[in-house]
Amino acid sequence: MHEAAPEDEGRTEGPGDDARTGRGPRARALLVGGALVVAVLGVGVAAALTGRAAGTEPSDAVGGAPAAEAPGDDPALAAETPAPTPVETNGVQQCGTFTGTAGTPVRVRGDDGEPTELGGLEGWWNGTPASDAGGWLDVEKWPRQVLDHPATVTVETTTGTVLESFDRRTCTGVEGWTAPDLSALPPSTVVVLDAETGEVLAEHPVELVTP
């Protein structure tokens, strides 16, 4: 009986195969593709063997059973998934550090009892929302409260003095605004109003100082 010589074994496995290291399946895979194909086919063979052990039929595809597709890879499923609803921003835009157009300040008594000029109030109505990382948020991610009130006016209720106004849609002051009847509001109070609806968004009582 003829015993296979070492060189015969090399011919059986094919060029480039290292039969003595037990990497026959990987060497055959190299004839199909490259190193990446080797890794995929190696996993495929293992999967096919596992399937037979569990009583299932191995796949006819090269390298064993095909990889399962992720749900997002299914065109039919993707077509059924509705696109996210666009955020209604009411025309609001990023205005940088601009916080409004100054009007006329009012003289009030400060916390130390001395007269001082008050030119407005600071709050969500004229601030720019920031992210946790410290940068500005995209307008679409701003709080709904800010987007619902794009234009505001700060006014003192006793004198009707407009301290400041801000329109986030134009990054300017509010143009052509006429003060509504303020008699229903508390006197000697600085209020922030929605420039279009008149809704009171914030208020701060003050002690006016007359000349």
Image (cartoon, rainbow, N blue to C red):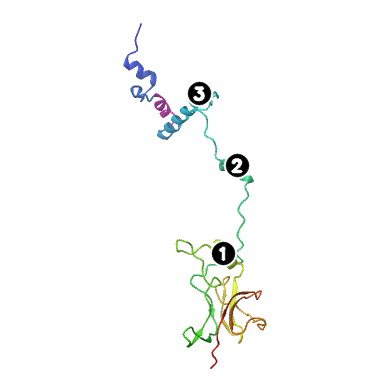
Q: Which residue corresponds to mark 1? A: 143
| Residue 60 point in image, percent of width and height | 53, 25
Q: Is residue 178 left or right of residue 18?
A: right
Give, as a three-letter code, the residue at label 3. Answer: Ala
Q: Give neighbour class at mark 1: few <14, some 14-19, many 20+ (Cα, 10 Å).
A: few
| Residue 86 point in image, percent of width and height | 61, 58
Q: Which residue corresponds to mark 2? A: 75
Mark 1: which secondary structure? loop
Q: Main secondary structure of the magenta part?
A: helix
Q: Give neighbour class at mark 2: few <14, some 14-19, many 20+ (Cα, 10 Å).
A: few
User: What residue is rendered at 34% in x and 10% in y?
Assistant: 3
Residue 93 visible to the viewer: yes
User: What residue is rendered at 39% in x and 24% in y?
Assistant: 24
Mark 3: which secondary structure? helix
Relative vertical location of residue 180 with respect to residue 36 in this rendering, above or below: below
Q: Give neighbour class at mark 3: few <14, some 14-19, many 20+ (Cα, 10 Å).
A: few
Tell us which disc is closer to us: 1 or 2.
1
Alpha carbons under labels 3 and 1: distance apart: 57 Å
Q: Which residue corresponds to mark 3? A: 53
Alpha carbons under labels 1 and 2: distance apart: 34 Å
Residue 91 visible to the viewer: no
Give, as a three-letter code, the residue at label 2. Answer: Pro
Mark 2: which secondary structure? helix
Q: Which residues are magenta?
A: 24-33
165 in the magenta segment: no
Q: Residue furthest bottom?
A: 211
Give, as a three-letter code, the residue at label 1. Answer: Pro
